[in-house]
């Protein structure tokens, strides 16, 4: 019997007006159906937005220390239930269990960080030209914020949006990806368990096509924070801009590493393979292109192939699996067609290129980790986000050429360089078009206490996480108080 889950709206578990449900399944074994989830429609979205709107004045007037206190309680709740939540992340997203534990740990760290924010100063007192005037700035919440999130970090991404949104005094409606509604339901349970006031957090499951419009266009929504594909993000930007709403978009990536001839090649290959293949490359910050300078191409490539072939392909519940299933059949087919196009464009597959065979892979959506070499910088495989375990190796004449290739794609999320040369490091850090820069490090993997986000088609530029989050989730007010009246 498949369990049926509900939306969480106004502090109550509710069915969708449509009366319909949809299911989610385990990418390692799609016959493992996780549950039935409400297929909400625009009427449900309006109900959830109205609940958030009704709660916003009370929440705004709640002390930020008290708001932060709820975040601390939520962090403790997650710590107490870490294993259950990590297993749920693995079951629904396919992620390796060690990485799922890390993701829940990150959600805990975010809740603690923004819990502290509740007691940090906001605003400044500024001298006025008039000595009778007290001149200061304050930060005000925006109101109701729609949070629209992808499936690949089903707990960390919703939390990294809602923790700052809530502590700065906003109320939220979360619309998780259709592939991972169960983990979102567990987030709602967390808020229920810590008695967050009704309507401050609301969960709405359902397809983006059915509820997205209302979440973006409703006059009761002040802002939209979205993470997902650049295609959907750009639609949201256009609709939000038309209505003068604030929006924040974190989107796709095509993240390069540059390997210079003086690099520690063993380290460079190890880190490149890890960045490209862990979680089957389904991270916005995954390494997708290795741009190799000069005569180390052969040695670097053979190290990469050797390390890739040694990776264990398997379900995320097995602690030694590195290359886990991709999210669904559509994604698997898409990855295969991009690999084939890479070959048609002149690339050579050195390892992988297909799906692993064997009964253990039968009902999961597995893809072999794939290394393609002799890839032209402007080939489709080298420019489009794949979201699969595929690494393109691209030759470059020199460091300048490598930088030009790295910057030639539309995306600009994360980028790395492997070298021991300080001048090369500093030049790269200055000129690479990416929001996250790694020196001798993996393009994936970031810390929550610093700003996160990309450039170009990867982001709208208003950073998430760390102190930067306050810029999006609040607006500044400048206050003049004249005390000269007698
Ligand atoms: P997606 O297809 O763009 O979906 C993201 C979210 O948007 C989902 O909740 C989706 O709902 C919703 N959505 C779809 N159509 C919509 C519409 N018309 N209006 C409003 N919302 C709509 O992305 P995904 O496949 O879930 O995630 C993978 C993508 O996310 C990749 O491109 C990856 O690079 C990106 N990503 C970026 C970051 C970052 O921080 N830069 C982090 C993680 C992932 P449904 O699921 O119901 O369609």
Image: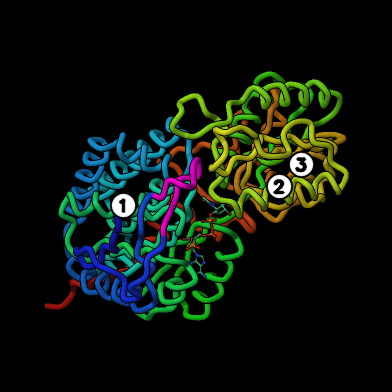
Of the numbered discs 1 and 3, the one sitting upstream in the chain is 1
Residue located beneath label 1 in the image: 1
352 in relation to 381, above or below: above
Mark yes or no: residue 307 visible: yes
Label 2 Cα crowd, 10 Å radius (few <14 / some 14-19 / many 20+)? many
**Which label number is shown at residue 35?**
none
Question: Horizontally, is 90 left or right of 420 in the view?
Answer: left
> Which residue corresponds to the image point at 41% horizontal and 42% vertical from the top-left?
91
Q: Secondary structure at mark 2?
A: helix
Residue located beneath label 2 in the image: 336
x and y, in percent, of residue 390 in the image: 68, 40
- Give residue 296's quadrant in the image: top right
Q: What secondary structure characterizes most of the magenta part?
A: strand
Q: Nearer the viewer, residue 133 or 446?
A: 446
Quadrant the C terminus occupies: bottom left
48 in relation to 187, above or below: below
């Amino acid at each position: 019997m498949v369990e049926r889950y509900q939306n969480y709206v106004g502090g109550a578990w509710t069915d969708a007006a449509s009366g319909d449900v949809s299911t989610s399944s385990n990418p390692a074994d799609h016959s493992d159906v996780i549950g039935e989830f409400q297929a909400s429609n625009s009427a449900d979205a309006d109900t959830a937005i109205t609940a958030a709107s009704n709660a916003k004045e009370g929440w705004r007037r709640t002390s930020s220390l008290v708001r932060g206190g709820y975040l601390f309680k939520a962090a403790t709740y997650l710590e107490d239930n870490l294993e259950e939540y990590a297993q749920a992340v693995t079951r629904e997203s396919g992620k390796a269990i060690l990485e799922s534990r890390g993701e829940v740990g990150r959600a805990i760290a975010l809740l603690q960080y923004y819990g502290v924010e509740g007691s940090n100063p906001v605003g400044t007192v500024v001298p006025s030209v008039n000595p009778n005037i007290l001149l200061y700035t304050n930060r005000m919440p925006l109101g109701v914020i729609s949070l629209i999130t992808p499936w690949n970090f089903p707990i960390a991404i919703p939390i990294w949006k809602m923790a700052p949104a809530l502590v700065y005094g906003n109320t939220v409606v979360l619309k998780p990806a259709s592939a991972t509604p169960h983990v979102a339901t567990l987030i709602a349970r967390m808020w229920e368990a810590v008695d967050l006031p009704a309507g401050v957090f609301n969960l709405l499951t359902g397809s983006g096509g059915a509820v997205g419009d209302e979440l973006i266009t409703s006059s009761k929504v002040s802002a939209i924070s979205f993470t997902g594909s650049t295609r959907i993000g750009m639609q949201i930007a256009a609709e939000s801009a038309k209505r003068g709403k604030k929006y924040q978009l974190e989107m796709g990536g095509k993240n390069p590493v540059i390997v210079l001839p003086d690099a520690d090649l063993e380290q460079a290959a190890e880190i490149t393979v890890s960045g490209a293949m862990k979680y089957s490359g389904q991270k916005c910050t995954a390494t997708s292109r290795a741009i190799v300078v000069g005569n180390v191409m052969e040695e670097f490539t053979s190290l990469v192939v050797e390390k890739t072939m040694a990776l264990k392909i398997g379900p995320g519940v097995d602690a030694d699996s590195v290359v886990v299933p991709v999210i669904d059949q559509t994604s698997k087919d898409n990855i295969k067609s991009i690999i084939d196009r890479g070959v048609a464009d002149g690339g050579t597959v050195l390892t992988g290129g297909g799906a692993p065979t064997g009964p253990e892979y039968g009902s999961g959506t597995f893809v072999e980790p794939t290394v393609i070499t002799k890839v032209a910088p402007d080939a489709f495989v080298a420019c489009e986000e794949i979201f699969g375990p595929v690494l393109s190796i691209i030759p470059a004449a020199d460091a300048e050429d490598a930088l030009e290739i790295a910057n030639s794609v539309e995306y600009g999320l994360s980028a790395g360089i492997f070298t021991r040369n300080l001048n090369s490091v500093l030049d790269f850090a200055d000129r690479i078009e990416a929001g996250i820069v790694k020196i001798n490090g993996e393009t994936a993997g970031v810390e929550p206490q610093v700003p996160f986000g990309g450039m170009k088609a990867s982001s709208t530029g208003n950073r998430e996480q760390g102190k930067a989050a306050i810029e999006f989730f609040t607006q500044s007010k400048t206050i003049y108080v004249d005390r000269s009246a007698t």
